[in-house]
Amino acid sequence: MANASEFGQSSPSLQNYASAASAVKLAAMALIMGISLLGNASLSLLLLKDSSLHKAPYYFLLDLCLADVVRSAVCFPFVMASIGGGGGGASAWPYSALGCKIVAFMSVLFCFHVAFLLFCVSVTRYMAIAHHRFYSKRMNLCTCAAVICMAWTLSAAMALPPVFDVGTYKFIREEEQCTFEHRHVKANDTLGFMLMLAVIVATTHVVYAKMLCFVYDHRKMKPAQLVPAISQNWTFHGPGATGQAAANWIAGFGRGPTPPTLVGIRQASHPGNRRLLVLDEFKTEKRIGKMYYMITLAFLVLWAPYISACYLRIFGRGAPVPQLYLTAAVWMSFAQAGANPIISFLFNKELRVRLRACFPCCLGTQTPMEPYCVI
């Protein structure tokens, strides 16, 4: 009788705890969804409206924002419905098995798309720094569209097989979502998918490391090499010539021809003839590269706990993942959908300036300067 009474007293407390946990999850999901929709939609409108941002790096950023908007608007409401549809705090999938497969396919599709696109962006960032002339000629709108289509195609190729039961898409009660069912490696078909995701993320960071090594290697100062000038009747010319050559000729010391144009003065060229990367362009490319690397790093940090839990399920037989850790890992992967706009505005001054320009009422008024004359 005592045990029964104790069980009767503990059962309401467990139900209250489950209801409170569900309420916290719903609130966190609503917050993530709101931040993702508002931030990505605002950044997308800014990139579409401002013509000065119609450049190759921002085309990729626009694609990332639109993918996160679709993920937040399509996938996250089903997660909220599964949390609130169980009754008594127990999560359940309130829809059909086909609907679960569709939602799981879209979730995995968007995850792999971000990974593949960030890898392609890392390659273009390296090309912009190391081979700027080739990059400026080839990276136009059509090339960016081709890269984006390739990323979507590869993502669909990775996410589509489980729809036809190559692997398994099903509702995972512990995660409150439809996704891969990760089991032990001997009874599991998703190991290849997880290895591909890990390889893509690792390769992306390798490309950024190579770009960093290139930048620091070319920042080393080399000793100056003096080249003697060539003299013909006191008219010095050649790489080592200076303005003294013209002064000597005007003073009558030389009887030869007019000194040639000094080597090193850049002549005006056609606008279509792109020159090498200069300081302002280098700073711009470096700033954009830093922004994309922070987006890539945020993707790694927010997805690493969940990927680790998946590998623990695959290789660890009889070692269940703690529920608290799994819940935190799943919600961190959801939070990645709203991280890109925040990182973009924090690490890209150009985007902040363009955003402030869209709200002229928020700009500080400058005091007009009075005209003056120098006596």
Image (cartoon, rainbow, N blue to C red):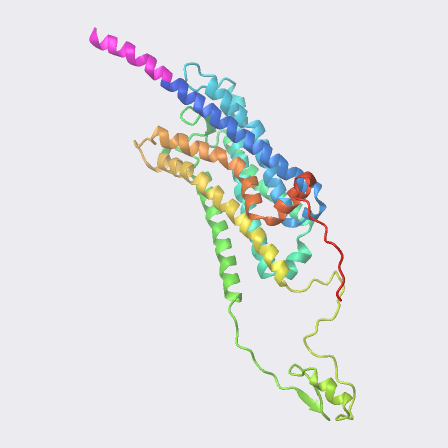
Q: Residue at x 53, y 22 (%)?
A: 98
Residue 85: image location, x then y, percent: 47, 16
* Residue 108 point in image, percent of width and height: 51, 34
Side of 354 where 305 appears, left or right: left
Judged from this view, the residue extending furthest toward the left is 2
- Is residue 49 left or right of 307 when viewed as pictured? right
Magenta stretch in the rendered image:
1-16
The part of the image, by quadrant, that contains residue 21 is top left
Q: Quadrant of the N terminus?
A: top left
**Where is residue 220 drawn, in percent x and y?**
51, 68
User: Is residue 213 one of those drawn in magenta?
Assistant: no
Left or right: residue 125 versus residue 175 is right
Numbered-mark total: 0
Indicate the quadrant where residue 257 lies.
bottom right
Q: Look at the image and tell me in which quarter the C terminus lies.
A: bottom right
Residue 350 in the image: x percent, y percent? 63, 49
